[in-house]
């Protein structure tokens, strides 16, 4: 992967959305990624008629998924899922190694409304208590890797931080922000997200060190991490979301004294695998009685949870004699 010194082209870096920019903080021995989501996130969220706080929470899940999924060095899928007792009892977001994103939320509309006005709702109130699972799926013939962490009234930023401390035991800072943005060119409000992750590198993981007869490596690493962590914590939501601030310029603001190197960006796009044929194959698995119970107003309508596409079938469409595998 091509590597570039940030100082060399900071002023010529293009404005771009829907990508993840990997980077390395040389002096502090850390690495990370910046994500910027525009049209891709808006496509994911606009496919649902969710209340604004639920869309914002799902946007956070998609942004976290993009930050973490982009680290995959193999063909596969990264999946983030929550199961809780909160008003939003399930979030699902996944990233495929081609840079494709999707997500959906399951929630109780009455419980969400009971929390108050949209702008006054704390995201942690939506999640409640339960667990957060992060899964790497490399395909049907391989074992899945999964890490699980408890959710105890946390928001997703805090939950992801807890995951890394408990499951990965790797010093990590992560923050994502989501908001609606007025696009003057389109005369419309659209969804945007931004996020930053930085992680400490061990010497074995690529940390550059100077040979010395006597070195307290642990103390050096702790000092370096404390410094870069404090710098990362100065990032503000409006910087993560600003469409006129490049990812490169943001990194320069945060870490310019630490010498930053950046890599080629990973492009992102919204996707969904649903199709009429896939839905037909799934529906073939149901019994005649189950299919009969699905009939409303003289037809069977199936809505994709991820993209909101609707597929309509006549009640006699399904030939039970040709049961197929999806």
Image (cartoon, rainbow, N blue to C red):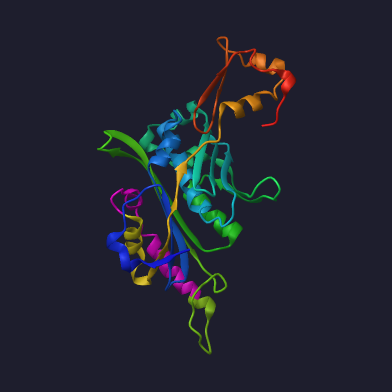
For residue 119, side relative to residue 316 (left or right): left
Magenta span has 238?
yes
In this orientation, which residue lies closer to the viewer: 95 or 30? 95
Percent position (x, y) of residue 146? 64, 50
Does any portion of residue 87 appear in the rendered image? no
Q: Which residue is drawn at the image coordinates 57% and 9% (left, top)? A: 298
Q: Quadrant of residue 72?
A: bottom right
Residue at the farthest top position: 298
Residue at the farthest right position: 321
Magenta span has 230?
yes
How many numbered badges does the structure rendering display? 0
Up-down: is 219 above or below 33?
below
Residue at the farthest bottom position: 213
Q: Which residue is drawn at the image coordinates 29% and 38% (left, top)? A: 182
Secondary structure mostly seen in magenta is helix
Name the quadrant of the C terminus: top right
Up-down: is 167 above or below 24?
above
Q: Which residue is drawn at the image coordinates 40% and 33% (left, top)? A: 52
- Magenta highlight range: 221-245
Does any portion of residue 207 appear in the rendered image? yes
Up-down: is 67 above or below 87?
below
Percent position (x, y) of residue 304? 54, 29
Q: Quadrant of residue 236?
A: bottom left
Percent position (x, y) of residue 37? 40, 46
For residue 283, side relative to residue 239 (left or right): right
């Amino acid at each position: 992967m091509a590597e570039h010194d940030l100082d060399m082209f900071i002023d010529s870096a293009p404005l771009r959305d829907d990508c993840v920019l990997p980077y390395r903080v040389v002096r502090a021995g850390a690495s990370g990624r910046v994500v910027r989501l525009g049209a891709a996130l808006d496509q994911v969220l606009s496919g649902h008629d969710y209340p604004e706080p639920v869309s914002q929470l799902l946007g956070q899940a998609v942004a976290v998924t993009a930050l973490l999924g982009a680290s995959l060095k193999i063909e596969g899928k990264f999946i983030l899922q929550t199961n809780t007792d909160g008003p939003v009892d399930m979030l699902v977001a996944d990233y495929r190694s081609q840079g494709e994103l999707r997500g959906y939320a399951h929630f109780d509309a009455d419980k969400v409304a009971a929390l108050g006005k949209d702008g006054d709702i704390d995201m942690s109130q939506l999640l409640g208590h339960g667990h957060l699972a992060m899964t790497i799926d490399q395909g049907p013939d391989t074992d899945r890797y999964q890490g699980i962490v408890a959710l105890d009234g946390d928001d997703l930023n805090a939950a992801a931080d807890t995951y890394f401390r408990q499951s990965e035991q790797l010093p990590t800072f992560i923050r994502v922000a989501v908001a609606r943005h007025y696009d003057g060119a389109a005369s419309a409000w659209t969804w945007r997200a931004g996020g930053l992750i930085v992680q400490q590198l061990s010497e074995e993981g690529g940390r550059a060190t100077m040979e010395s007869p006597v070195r307290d490596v642990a103390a050096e690493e702790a000092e370096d991490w404390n410094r870069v962590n404090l710098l990362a914590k100065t990032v503000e939501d409006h910087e993560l979301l600003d469409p006129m601030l490049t990812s490169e310029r943001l990194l320069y603001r945060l870490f310019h004294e630490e010498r930053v190197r950046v890599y080629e960006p990973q492009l992102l796009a919204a996707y969904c695998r649903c199709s009429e044929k896939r839905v037909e194959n799934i529906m073939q698995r149901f019994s005649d009685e189950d299919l009969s119970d699905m009939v409303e107003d003289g037809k069977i309508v199936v809505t994709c949870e991820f993209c909101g596409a609707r597929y309509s079938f006549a009640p006699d469409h399904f030939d039970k004699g040709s049961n197929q595998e999806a």
